Amino acid sequence: IIKNLYYLSAFGRCGNETQSLANVDLTSNFMNNPRDFLNEIVEVIVDRPMGSCHPKFDDMIYPLNYGYVPSTISGDGKEIDVYVLGEDRPLEKFKGECIAFIERDEESDPKLIVVSTGENFSDEEIQELVNFQEQFFTSKVIRKY
C-alpha cells in the first residue's frame, strides 16, 4: 500500500507531492476485500465480452462476460475482476448478485462471481465455467466469510 501511495503521489493523482498524508483522502487507495461483496448487488463494467479475445493471449476466447467493479482496488492495483455467469450474449454492463469469488494461490487478485439476482451455481459449475482461464492457476471457490 505504501508503494502505491508513493506512486500515486509522484504522478499527481493524490494532489501536490508535498501534501501531507493527513490531508489526503486515502479510502480509495486501499484494497477491497472480496468477502465484502458476497451476497451484495454489484454493478460490473464488462471489458471482455463473451466471444472476445484475451488482451495478451490471442488464442484465449472468453466464453462468458468478464469485467470489473469500478472504483475498487484489487491485489494487482487494478479494479476487482468479475466473471459474469448465466448470460448468453455479450454485454457492456451488468448488475447482479455476487454469489462467490475465486481465490488463487499464486496471486492476491480475486475474481468475483456475479449472476442475475436469485440465480445460483454450484462450486463445481463455477469451476467448470471459469476453467478456460483458471486452469492455469491453483484456485478455489469461496462463498463464506
Image (cartoon, grey):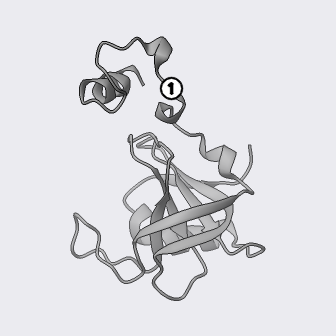
Q: Position of residue 24 (x, y in %)?
A: 46, 21
Q: Position of residue 13 (x, y in %)?
A: 33, 33
Q: Residue visible at 48% across and 80% down?
A: 91
Q: Secondary structure at mark 1?
A: loop
Q: Residue visible at 30% across and 12% down?
A: 18
Q: Position of residue 40 (x, y in %)?
A: 72, 56
Q: Residue visible at 74% across and 43% down?
A: 145
Q: Which residue sits furthest bottom? A: 88
* 131 over 24 or under it: above or below: below
Question: Which residue is identified by label 1?
Answer: 25
* 1 over 130 or under it: above or below: above
Left or right of 34: which side holds 40?
right
Q: Quadrant of the N terminus?
A: top left
Left or right of 25: which side holds 106?
left
Mark 1: amino acid? Asp
Total numbered badges shown on the rendered structure: 1
Mark 1: few, some, or many residues within 10 Å (few <14, many ≥20)?
few
Left or right of 1: which side holds 58?
left
